[in-house]
Image (cartoon, rainbow, N blue to C red):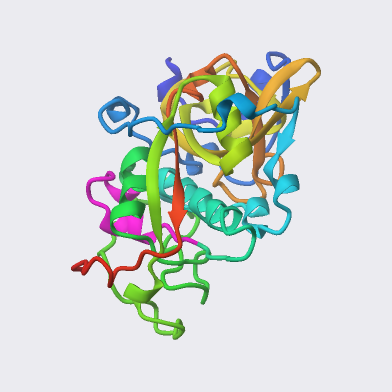
Amino acid sequence: MGFSSVRLSRNTIADRIQNLTKTWTPGRNPMPADFYKGGVRLEEQELFRLPQGILLLESAVKLPDSFDAREKWPDCPSLREIRNQGCCGSCWAISAASTMTDRWCIHSQNKSQFSFGSYDLIACCHHCGDGCEGGNLGPAWKYWVERGVSSGGPYNSQTGCHPYPIDVCHSKDEDDKQFKCSRKCQLSYNQTSYLRDLRFGREAYSVAMDEGRIMEEIFLNGPVQASFKLYKDFKAYRSGVYRHVWGPFETGHAIKIFGWGTENNVKYWLCANSWGDDWGDNGFFKIIRGENHLDIEGNVHAGLPDYSKSAAMFDLEY
């Protein structure tokens, strides 16, 4: 019987691989493995990759052996937040919105806080993908530049224009949901209209598949969005530096990289996941760095905010 025909319980994965993992520790996460979803269309990656950005200060950058964006920009609280994509393959949108939020604060020199929601990307960016059925990184950043993204808080919250619309899974057979694009904020959000709530990017770009260039981008401009190949064993991650050791390939998964370091002589990327703060290491994880493990360095995207642009300036029609 093949891996794909076996439904694994939440602790069976850890039991199977505990003698295989040399750099990380597996264990029981609170949800069954099938409830943790990916959502990146890896087969479309090259088609939707944005042009590479240029780091003008490259020759002057001296990179430290370890780096944590939370320490460099302590006044940006979003760097310590973990989002939860719930029962939806929206990691591509969630990690993009989270990274946009970090960069909005960082490039304002910690003077401006704006929590980008992922609703616009999921429901309105039709060329990004298909909502909960998965999407692509590049188009999400391009949408930020061209159409803007509204604010949004967690599921069922009164925070922001569009709070996240999907709860966690409650059954293994729960269907992914579809959403209608809405140009109106929730009734409890009376700070401004949808159009005035939108915030824009100035440029969007990919980062070269190079360990040093990715590190430079993070060090200078803040966290980046990346994707990798999601295998079953990742769902049992609890601590350490993840390296795939067992299980079937499932799909692509998008996350946020915000730092790097070395643990027991193993180089890693420091990342934020979107499966809630009770998964993994309080929602965070480390993964092998410098080997393009599972293509973690092959699809990296980011962008820079524009604090002067508004929907009215461009007479955008919604």
Q: Quadrant of residue 134?
A: top left
In magenta, the rendered stretch is 116-132
Q: Nearer the viewer, residue 283 or 98?
A: 98
Residue 119 belongs to magenta span: yes
Determine whether 224 is above or below 73 in the image: above
Relative placement, left or right, of 206 versus 292 is left
From the image, which quarter does the N terminus lie in?
top left
Residue located 81% across and 18% down the image: 264
Q: Nearer the viewer, residue 311 or 86?
A: 311
Residue located 36% across and 64% down the image: 309
From the image, which quarter does the C terminus lie in?
bottom left
Residue 188 belongs to magenta span: no
Relative placement, left or right, of 74 versus 107 is right
Q: Is residue 27 visible?
A: yes
Q: Residue furthest left?
A: 317
Q: Position of residue 284 (x, y in %)?
A: 66, 41
Q: Quadrant of residue 236?
A: top right
Determine whether 251 is above or below 255 in the image: above
Q: Is residue 136 visible?
A: no
Residue located 29% across and 68% down the image: 311
Q: Nearer the viewer, residue 261 or 285?
A: 261
Q: Position of residue 172 (x, y in %)?
A: 44, 45
Q: Position of residue 80 (x, y in %)?
A: 68, 52
Q: Position of residue 168 (x, y in %)?
A: 50, 55
Q: Nearer the viewer, residue 248 or 285?
A: 285
Number of numbered markers = 0
